[in-house]
C-alpha cells in the first residue's frame, strides 16, 4: 500500500500542506494555534448567525413591505381596533376603515378584515423572530460543543424554515 501526501515547495524546502488556517509552521512541522482556532470558530459561528439574520431580514421585508406602508397598516389596525372597541358606531367610521368599505363590505366587516390581516402579519413576524432567535442560540450551542457541521446544519434548516414563513 502506498500513501501519497501532497507536498508544497517553500523557500526553506518541501513541506506538507497546511492542515488548516489555524495551523502555523514552526520550522519543522505544522502546529495548531489554539487561540487562532478558537477565533476562526467564533468567526464561523458569527457568520452562520449573520446568515440567519439576513434571511430573516429578507423575509421581514417581504412580509411588511415598505416601512411607510407598514406604518400605514399599523395605524389602520389601531383605528380599526378603536372602532371595534367603540361598538362599530356607524357615524364615526375612521378614515382608515372607511377606505376598506368597498364592494358591499360594511364598515364592521372592513374593520374586522383589517384586524385579521394585522393579526396574521403579527403572527408571522413573531414566528420569524422566534425562528431567528432560537436558530442563533442553537448554532451557538452546537459551536460551543465544537460541532461546527451541526451548527451549519442548524443554520441551513433555520433559513429554510424562515423562508417558509413568507410562503405560508
Image: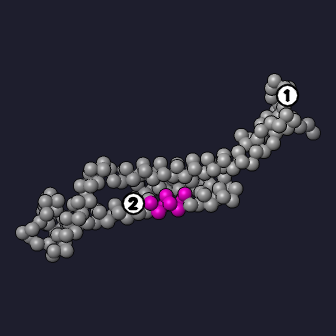
Residue 9 as seen in the image, left or right of residue 70: right
Residue 123 in magenta stretch: no
Q: Residue reaching furthest left?
A: 91
Q: CA distance from mark 2 to mark 1?
A: 57 Å
Q: Which residue is mark 2?
A: 125
Tag 1 secondary structure? strand
Residue 131 in magenta stretch: yes
Residue 96 as seen in the image, left or right of residue 73: left
- Where does the N terminus fall, quadrant-wise? top right
Residue 8 in sight here: yes
List x then y, in percent, for residue 4.
86, 35
Name the quadrant containing residue 71. bottom left
Name the quadrant containing residue 126. bottom left
Tag 2 secondary structure? helix
Residue at coordinates 15% horizontally, 75% vertically from top-left?
87
List x then y, in percent, for residue 33.
76, 45
Q: Residue reaching furthest right?
A: 1
Residue 147 as seen in the image, left or right of residue 13: left
Q: Residues in magenta? A: 129-136
List x then y, in percent, for residue 157.
55, 55
Tag 1 or tag 2, which sits nearer the N-term?
A: 1
Residue at coordinates 9% horizontally, 68% vertically from top-left?
92
The one nearer the camera, 164 or 51, is 51
Placement of 101 over or under 8, stated as above or below: below
Residue 103 in sight here: no
Amino acid at each position: 500500500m502506498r500513501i501519497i501526501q501532497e507536498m508544497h515547495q517553500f523557500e526553506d524546502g518541501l513541506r506538507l500542506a497546511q492542515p488548516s488556517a489555524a495551523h502555523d509552521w514552526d520550522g519543522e512541522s505544522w502546529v495548531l494555534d489554539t487561540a487562532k482556532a478558537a477565533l476562526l470558530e467564533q468567526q464561523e459561528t458569527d457568520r452562520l448567525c449573520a446568515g440567519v439574520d439576513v434571511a430573516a431580514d429578507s423575509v421581514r421585508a417581504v412580509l411588511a413591505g415598505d416601512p411607510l406602508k407598514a406604518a400605514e397598516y399599523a395605524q389602520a389596525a389601531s383605528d380599526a381596533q378603536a372602532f371595534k372597541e367603540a361598538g362599530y358606531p356607524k357615524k364615526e367610521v375612521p378614515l382608515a376603515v372607511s377606505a376598506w368599505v368597498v364592494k358591499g363590505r360594511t364598515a364592521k366587516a372592513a374593520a374586522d378584515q383589517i384586524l385579521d390581516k394585522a393579526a396574521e402579519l403579527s403572527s408571522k413576524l413573531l414566528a420569524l423572530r422566534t425562528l431567528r432567535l432560537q436558530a442563533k442560540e442553537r448554532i451557538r450551542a452546537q459551536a460551543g460543543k465544537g460541532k461546527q457541521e451541526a451548527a451549519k446544519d442548524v443554520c441551513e434548516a433555520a433559513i429554510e424554515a424562515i423562508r417558509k414563513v413568507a410562503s405560508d
